[in-house]
Structures are given as structure tokens and as C-alpha cells.
Image: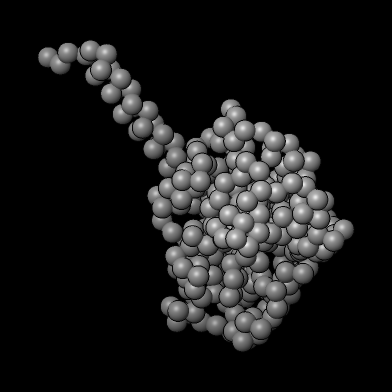
Amino acid sequence: MVAYNSSNMNRLKFVGSFLAWTLAASAATHPEMLVSTDWLAQHLGDAKLAILHVSANRTAYDAGHIPGAHFVPLSDIAVTRNGVPNELAPDADLKRVFEAAGVSDDTRVVLYGDTSVLPATRAFLTLDYVGHTNHAMLDGGLGKWTSEGRTLTKDAPATTAGHLTLHPKPELVTQFEQVSELSKRPSSAAQSPVLLDVRPATDFRGEKGWHIATSSNAYWMDSQMSRENQTLKPEADLRKMYETAGVKPGTPVVTYCNSGMQASQAYFTLKYLGYDVKMYDGSMSEWTLKGAPVEK
């Protein structure tokens, strides 16, 4: 018979807590937010599917895109407001842009980018903001699709306008005043959201810039396989990366970068992992424009 002394009981409690956390972390992941190239290839003809190729320009789209994909210019969903770039476009404009690309309330939307994933993750955040509930990223984007020798076309799809009912969620976008308050709290404060700077470490440390007080750093690109390969790293690697930056299970997170582009990729990845995440859209562009304090 095993003697259940206090040491053994503590050990069992630790093992039990660890297993419970592991199961909770695994259950928290949202696999529906990411589709594979195999899945998309098998569903290209689905009537309720809208594929959006989102980019800053049409160069790659015109050279060859995934069959059925509509082109959405980044400038249609991210605008300059009060001197701050890449802010959310007005609600009416967002409705018009997505409906023109065939997005309806009951449409399954798949987003992808070409040379960069950032315009597509920015579109993902935007669809979250307008209240659409069934959209996903194509893991690996156009690069993975092309490397696998899958079909490309130069033909634009026939346009059937969608019908999108807006249910704006402004709470997903953290404002300057809220971030200002967070920057004054100790990062160890109970239940205090983690301010996560997702720019390169050189920007965060001050070699090329500065950061907001109390924030930690996790470079967004470290969550994908490489600069060229946009496929997300395995879940365990992603969790380790964010936990190293102080993002623990159950802790709210606010991502930021220079202008709300890099932060949108971290927003997507953290939401995919099941974290409670929001984004500071104005990011360092607004922060420095307002003369708010920064530190190295």
C-alpha cells in the first residue's frame, strides 16, 4: 500500500493540475479557424464558400490566383484616420467591400495572402469586427498552394453580391485610453491583460524604436515556419512562444505593433489557440502621434 503523505499528495495535485491544464489548453484551440490546402481543394465548388485574396496590390492575383478567389485590396478595409494608418474603414464601406466579394451571413469565408500573410489576417480581424462568424485562414497561403502544384487561374470569378448583416464588435479593438491605463499597471497585477508588442526584437528593445511600458515582446513572424513559408508552427511551439513572453492560459492579451498589421497576425494566432485577445489598432503610430511615453 502506498503511503499518501503530504509530499505524495502535493505531487499528485501537481500532476492533476498539469493534466487539467493540458486538456484545457488543447480543448481551447479553434481548428475551424484554419483550413488546409487539401480542404480548400476539395471544397472549391461549394455554393456557400467565398475565397478572398487580400493584398496591398493586384500583382500576384493577376499573375495567378486560386480558382474562384475574389481580390480584396487592403486599402478597402484599412484606411488612414486622423493621421493614423491602417485603421478600420467605416462600417458601411466594410459592408460594401465584403458583399461585393460574395460574403453573406451564412457564407464560409477563406482568406489568404500572397507575399505576406498580414493583409489576410487584417481581413480576418475585420470580419470578426463586423460580426461575421464563419471565416478562416488558409494555412500557408498562396505560397503553399503554389508549391504543391495546385491549379491557378488568371480569370476573375463571376460576381454575385452577398448580403452581410453587420453586428459590430468595437470591444475587439482596444483604444488609446485603455492602453494608456494598462501601461501604468504592473505587468504582474492580477488579471491584468498582457500588452504584447509583436514587432521584431530590435524595435522592441529600442535599437530601432521603443515600446509601451509594461509590454512584453513576441515577434509575430516567429509563429510561422519561416519568412517564405507562412504555414503556422505546431500548436505546442506556438504556446511555448507566447508563454515565454508572459502570456499564460486564461490571461487576456492586447496585441500591438507599428500600425495594426503585424498585430493582426498575432491576434489571429492567439485567438486560434483559445486566448482572450484584442488588438490595439492605433499601435505605435497613434501612441507616438499623441506623444505618449515610451521606453527602451
Q: Position of residue 37 (x, y in %)?
A: 48, 69
Q: Position of residue 108 (x, y in %)?
A: 62, 59
Q: Nearer the viewer, residue 40 or 146?
A: 146
Please identify the quarter of the rendering in which residue 169 is found: top right
* Residue 181 shows up from this direction: yes
Q: Nearer the viewer, residue 49 or 228?
A: 228
Which residue is found at the position 49% from the left and 60% from the top?
222
Which residue is found at the position 12% from the left and 14% from the top?
1
**Scheme by which the image is coloured:** one colour
Q: Position of residue 246 (x, y in %)?
A: 51, 41
Question: On the rendered structure, is 21 left or right of 52?
Answer: left
* Residue 198 shows up from this direction: no
Q: Position of residue 192 (x, y in %)?
A: 62, 33
Question: On the rendered structure, is 62 left or right of 15?
Answer: right
Q: Nearer the viewer, residue 204 or 116?
A: 204
Which residue is found at the position 85% from the left and 61% from the top?
83
Which residue is found at the position 66% from the left and 70% from the top?
54
Q: Nearer the viewer, residue 257 or 277?
A: 257
Question: On the rendered structure, is 224 left or right of 101?
Answer: left
Q: Is residue 247 above or below residue 42?
A: above
Question: On the rendered structure, is 90 left or right of 191?
Answer: right
Please identify the quarter of the rendering in which residue 170 is found: top right
